């Protein structure tokens, strides 16, 4: 049940939001087995004065942060990153130069979900992929 934050310039991110949403979720389902109905995404659209980035990036510059339970293999995480770049380029037309992805992992007991600590949840998907 990864939680996704997507940051970008409002005028560039807003028209690509739906394509990005689909690409991100498709990559999560394909690579780490995220269930179809477990889409948790937030789009943070910023004005230029609040989103400062290097001059070698275009206005399509986008940052994706993925928070998820600890337990996926290094290869699964690398594969997720590779597939994200591929699917986002194909569907949202954001090139790799303008995309950065960070994965944050925390132990399940550090999450609170539906009123209980995350390590007490019965999951319908695998974490150790």
Image: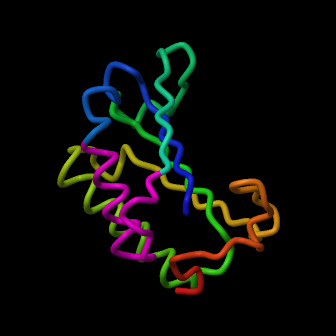
In the image, taking residue 119 as reference, residue 75 lies left or right, namely left
Any magenta on residue 20? Answer: yes
- Residue at left offset 62%, top offset 57%: 67
Give the percent coordinates (x, y) of residue 96.
33, 53
Give the percent coordinates (x, y) of residue 84.
36, 61
- Residue at left offset 68%, top offset 74%: 70
- Residue at left offset 62%, top offset 63%: 68
Q: Which residues are magenta?
A: 19-39
Give the percent coordinates (x, y) of residue 64.
49, 48
Any magenta on residue 125? Answer: no
Measured along the vertical axis of the image, is residue 84 above or below residue 33? above
Q: Main secondary structure of the magenta part?
A: helix
In the image, taking residue 50 as reference, residue 92 lies left or right, namely left
To which quarter of the image does residue 27 belong?
A: bottom left
Question: Which corner quadrant holds the N terminus?
Answer: bottom right
- Residue at left offset 39%, top offset 76%: 31
Give the percent coordinates (x, y) of residue 75.
49, 84
To which quarter of the image does residue 83 belong?
A: bottom left
Q: How is the image coloured?
A: rainbow
Measured along the vertical axis of the image, is residue 4 above or below residue 106? above
């Amino acid at each position: 049940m990864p939680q996704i934050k997507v940051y970008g310039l409002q005028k560039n991110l807003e028209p690509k939001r739906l394509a990005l949403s689909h690409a991100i979720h498709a990559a999560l389902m394909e690579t780490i087995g995220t269930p179809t109905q477990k889409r948790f995404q937030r789009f943070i659209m910023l004005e230029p004065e609040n989103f400062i980035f290097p001059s070698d990036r275009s206005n399509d510059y986008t940052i994706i942060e993925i928070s998820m339970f600890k337990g996926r293999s290094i290869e699964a995480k690398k594969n997720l990153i590779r597939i994200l770049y591929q699917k986002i380029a194909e569907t949202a037309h954001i090139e790799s130069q303008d995309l950065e992805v960070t994965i944050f992992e925390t132990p399940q007991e550090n999450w609170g979900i539906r009123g209980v600590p995350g390590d007490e949840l019965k999951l319908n998907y695998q974490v150790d992929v």
